[in-house]
Image (spheres, rainbow, N blue to C red):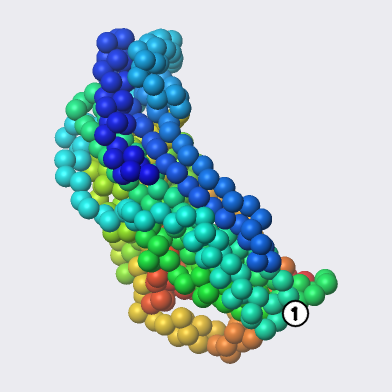
Amino acid sequence: MSSLFDQSALVTLAELLVAAARRAGADAADAIATRGVSLSVDVRDGTVEESTRSEDDDLGLRVLVGRRQAVVSTNDLARDGVDALAERAVAMARVAPEDPYAGLADPALLARDFPDLDLVDHTIPDVGVLEARAQAAEAAGLAVPGVSKSGGASASAGIGGMVLVTSTGFTGIYVGSRHSVAMTAIAGEGTKMEQDHDWSSAVHASDLDDPQSIGRTAGERAVKRLDPRKVSTRKVPVVYAPRVAGSLVSHLVSAVNGASIARKTSLLRDKLGQRIFSPGIRIIDDPLRRRGLRSHPFDAEGVAGRRLALVDDGVITTWILDCATARELGMTTTGHAQRGVSSTPSPSASNVHLEAGAETAAELIGDISDGLYVTDLIGMGVNMVTGDYSRGAAGFWIENGTLTYPVSEVTIAGNLIDMFATLRPANDLAFRYGVNAPTVRVEGLTVAGV
């Protein structure tokens, strides 16, 4: 396990590969090396159904000959194969079509200081610990009155590191760990069964939600969903619970991705600098959040990470950009390049959250005489070109400011532009996922039922 924390061998290998690429005729090159190990345990009815362990070592090389580029990857990290891999990559680049936007990051933008983001839990649990976590979650879920059976529980842990070396002199390393626990509970019998779940994921095991609370929450959620009703079609306010509210933020993130803007496939392609949310709304991307699930000190091109407001006071302030997309749009990268060992960089968000509002969730619901509180979304019926939004949903009907009976098999529909304009966040923001949001309220959606 010590090799997971010491990445020096990968650094040496990546440096050799970049040097070999230059000798083979590349004008520029970068190499990514990754190493990781993960363990997971699946439990059902107190018995381990599956226990898996995976280990991965991978190496990727990108070379540029003029504006032509190619990427090769391998999981054979032997030094004697470095020259052959580099020569193959350069040969591929020479016959590749020209890409006017291809190239390494401007050296002036590269990270020089690497902040300590506390991304490593040096204690990796063994299978026995993971089994105990999963069994504790399952037992707690089954103990909830009304829960009839388990849909399974799981626990996992892993650690992985990444090395990036470029021909412009950048060398960067970071290592991160991940722990998770989850449980699915089933309530009711026969054709009247309902299920729900809960899960927790964290960089450090000490930040995980207690397995018993995960199971108990899953069980309570499943029981509350028993005997759902259908509702007649109408237009009402819709309130999204925090665990699904992040999906609205994810739609915004997709719409401000520079690749979508360049392809003209985003509903926000002409909205930069315009207010599309209410005043006061802020949506933040922060790759430097300590112990964040998507935190990193530099991106896949070596560009320094920084906290960025995607939306500030309701106004779209920027696109999410890597170097190539930024060049295509005549802009500067925002440090959002993501890359696998076998692919070229592309823009992708890091830790994203919608800042909390001033109202409590109860206050957000309190004046709704007729509406829907959504706890579960189904399907991906969102057109990111037009903004048309239609998704299956389940949750609870709101009457006179109170959650009343469970509702299922309904569809909620609207348009993202209109939804963003009326979105109101509550004050219950918690950082549990890669994309986080508090409870949010959206006006005037069509709820289609019977």
Q: Nearer the viewer, residue 370 or 140?
A: 140
Which residue is located at x 34 percent, y 39 percent?
3
Quadrant hosting residue 448: bottom right
Which residue occupies the extreme right position in the image? 190
Q: Position of residue 69 (x, y in %)?
A: 38, 19
Residue nearer the viewer, 422 or 198: 198
Amino acid carrying mark 1 in the image: Asp
Q: Quadrant of residue 142?
A: bottom right
Disc 1 element: loop
Residue 273 in view in this figure: no
Residue positioned 51% across, 70% down in the render: 211
> Neighbour class for label 1 at 10 Å: few (<14), some, many (≥20)?
some
Q: From the image, which quarter does the C terminus lie in? A: bottom right
Considering the image in quadrants, where does the N terminus appear?
top left
Whether residue 72 appears in this view of the structure is yes
Circle 1 residue: 227
Q: Position of residue 32 (x, y in %)?
A: 35, 31
Up-down relation of residue 119 to residue 394 (above or below) = above
User: How many labels sit on residues?
Assistant: 1
Q: Is residue 366 above or below residue 309?
A: below
Residue 13 x/y as whole percent: 31, 25
Is residue 314 or residue 297 the one in the foreground? 297
Q: Is residue 196 left or right of residue 279?
A: right
Vertical placement of 371 versus 186: above or below? below
Q: Residue at x 24, y 23 (%)?
A: 167
Identify the residue shown where x is 25% and y is 37%. Answer: 172
Instruction: Please tell me which residue lies in front, 199 or 299.
Output: 199
